[in-house]
Amino acid sequence: MKLTSKIIFNSYFFAILYIPLVYLAYYSFNSGKTMIDFEGFSWKHYVELFANTRMMVIVINTLVVALLCGLFSAVLGTFRSIRYILT
């Protein structure tokens, strides 16, 4: 594969991954109820999130699972790379 085709493929791949995340992050600050029109900047949704204790438990559990997965992946990857180097 040529270098230009790799760059095009990688750009397309990362655009597919990150455009929905940017879209959701942008519209999470919307004062309206839908994601069709941006009506104005608001912290309303985040205030409601942090006021709800059940949602906070869910957020904390999600962060713990994400951190444990990252830690496990880092340890496993380190051991695998050490094994690869030594063999």
Image: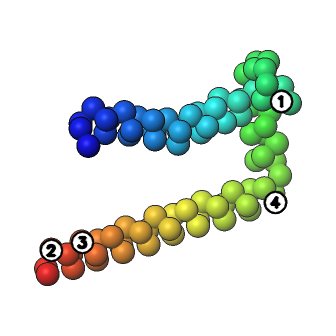
For the residues marked 2 and 3, what is the alpha-carbon distance in whole angstroms? 6 Å
Is 35 located above or below residue 67 in the figure? Answer: above
Q: Quickly name the residue at label 4.
A: 54
The type of residue carrying mark 2 is Ile
For the residues marked 1 and 2, what is the alpha-carbon distance in whole angstroms? 52 Å
Q: Quickly name the residue at label 1.
A: 34
Q: Quickly name the residue at label 3.
A: 81
The disc label shown at residue 85, or none = 2
Q: Position of residue 4 (x, y in %)?
A: 27, 32
What quarter of the picture does the N terminus occupy? Answer: top left
Of mark 2 and mark 4, the one earlier in the sequence is 4
Residue neighbourhood size for the residue with mark 1, other residues' Cα within 10 Å, grouped as few (<14), some (14–19), many (≥20): few
The type of residue carrying mark 3 is Ser
Left or right, 51 with respect to 16, comes to right
Residue neighbourhood size for the residue with mark 2, other residues' Cα within 10 Å, grouped as few (<14), some (14–19), many (≥20): few
For the residues marked 2 and 4, what is the alpha-carbon distance in whole angstroms? 46 Å
Of mark 1 and mark 2, the one earlier in the sequence is 1
Residue neighbourhood size for the residue with mark 3, other residues' Cα within 10 Å, grouped as few (<14), some (14–19), many (≥20): few
Q: Does residue 47 appear in this view?
A: yes
Q: Residue at x 24, y 36 (%)?
A: 3
Is 42 located above or below residue 51 in the figure? Answer: above
Left or right, 82 with respect to 7, comes to left
Q: Residue at x 36, y 73 (%)?
A: 75
Q: Are marks 2 and 3 in contact (CB under 8 Å)?
A: yes
Q: Position of residue 20 (x, y in %)?
A: 61, 37
Q: Are marks 4 and 1 in contact (CB under 8 Å)?
A: no
Of mark 4 and mark 1, the one earlier in the sequence is 1
